Image (cartoon, grey):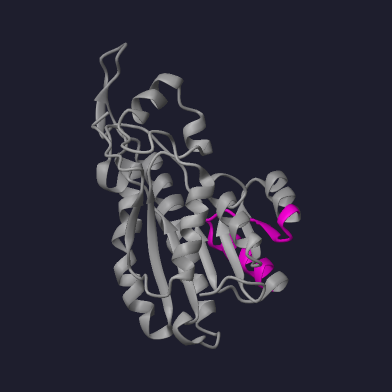
Amino acid sequence: MQINSQISAIVTGGASGLGEASARILASKGAKVTLFDLNEERGTALASEIGGAFAKVNVADEASVDAGFAIAREAHGQERIMINCAGIGWAAKTAGRNRKTGEIVSHGIADFQRVININLVGTFMCLAKSAAGMMTLEPDGDSGRGVIINTASVAAQDGQIGQVAYSASKGGIVAMTLPIARDLAREGIRCNVILPGFFDTPIYETLPAEVKDSLRAHLQFPARFGRPEEYGQFAASLIENDYINAEEIRLDAGARMPPR
């Protein structure tokens, strides 16, 4: 699919990190971009900067998602590109001991459900509603009706200690890629998923320096955290290459995460 001024796109989590980088790349190629995010101040400013639109959206709330799609389509028409970057991190063991008291505690069920609802259910809700809208469009030869790109994580395959909820949410995104692509094949809609490694995004900005150094030691080459724009460039290449479909692709400088 050629990205140009005739194409509209929606990017969830678009006000920062990988989503912001993706939105900037798409806009630089001419696309009309709507950002879905909870950060209204930053999202509005970025949308103004790139000539796009902003909708304050909680991806885990269906009414909020529906309202966001209404804003996006009113501003730019039916989207042909959907990039899902919205998500949260979380760390807690399946069960463990309190180091100070010795008390045995299990993973909070509400916390587990929250991560699944935002990362997995939120991604699916946005892509399913976007796909239904794309089906109303006329196909454009090999480029079809639309492209969906989801964001998982290398944690889907290399989950570390304490990442059970996060890994489950991202593993679900990977697992649903092939059936989604098969569901939408007749409609000319492609679906791929990117598994980022360690990127300079808000999730990693909060980590102590020693933790970052430990993670960096497991990179192959280049031995640095990824730049968000590298994710955005890769997402754009997946959109533009019509022959890539139903793929799960690591973007990680050859990293494999250790147990901790």
Q: How many marks?
A: 0
In this rendering, the answer to whether 246 lies above or below 41 is: below
Residue 217 point in image, percent of width and height: 32, 28
Decide which of 241, 260 is in the foreground and name it. 241
| 94 shown above or below 174 | above
Residue 174, how many percent across, how many down? Answer: 32, 58
Whether 172 is among the magenta residues is no
Residue at x-position 38% and y-position 38%: 222
Q: Is residue 208 above or below residue 243?
A: above
Give the image location of residue 187, x and y in percent.
42, 84
Q: Which percent across, then down, holds residue 162?
A: 30, 33
Region of the chain picked out in magenta, as a range? 49-73
**Viewer-nearest residue: 97 or 247:** 247
Q: Is residue 156 left or right of residue 32?
A: left
Query: Compared to 148, does 144 lie above or below?
Result: below
In front of the other: 256 or 19 = 256
Residue 151, picture quadrant: bottom left
Q: Residue at x 70, y 50 (%)?
A: 46
Question: Which residue is found at the position 44% from the left and 36% from the top?
Answer: 225
